[in-house]
Amino acid sequence: MTFTFATSDVLALLAFLLSGVATWKTVQFNKRQQSLIESQERLNKLMIDKGLAESANEQKADLGATFVKLGSSKVRLKIWNKGQATARNVQIEFPEGEEIVSSSEIEEKFPLETLEQYQSVELIARTFMGAKRKHAIVLRWADDNSTENEKTVYPTW
């Protein structure tokens, strides 16, 4: 039994091989395309998460405190808001005692109704020989994100 190949047989075989190569390339391309789509979906999810986090930060106040020296003997306790939202009903507490700031000064200014972004309030600090240089201060406030925020800071002078 002898096989003879006609020109049409050779062309059909070449067409079949070419079709196989094209199919294989198409499968590879589809795999790469699917990988790209998955990467794009992950990136979109990250961008959405970032946007939500930024939106949440816009609703938060962030209070802090530090001692500021004015000249050689005057010291002020400065409470400020570096967050993007307004802090409301700001309260201050000294868990270790109010020896550094007079209670009348605290009662006069606190609770503070509002503390806008980058706004601050200063309290006259009493420094004396033997006074602790580091003080625990608890700040409590409400903002657009939560009605009960609390932060403990440890400023030094």
Image (cartoon, helix red, strand yellow):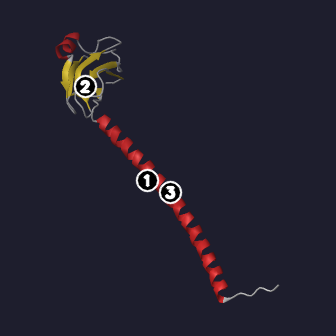
Sequence-earlier tag: 2 or 1 = 1
Local SS, label 1: helix
Q: On the image, which quarter does residue 143 sit in? A: top left
**Residue to which mark 2 is pinned:** 79
Q: Quadrant of the C terminus?
A: top left
Q: Is residue 4 left or right of residue 123?
A: right
* Badge 1: residue crowd in 10 Å (few <14, some 14–19, many ≥20): few
Q: Amino acid at mark 3?
A: Gln
**Residue to which mark 1 is pinned:** 40
Q: Residue at x 31, y 34 (%)?
A: 56
Marking on residue 74: none
Q: On the image, which quarter does residue 134 sit in? A: top left
Give the answer, above or below, for where 16 lies relative to 40: below
Marks 2 and 1, Cα distance to the nearest angstrom?
A: 44 Å
Local SS, label 2: strand
Q: Residue at x 48, y 52 (%)?
A: 38
Marking on residue 34: 3
- Residue 129: % across, % down: 31, 15
Question: Can you tell which of label 3 and label 1 is closer to the viewer?
Answer: 3
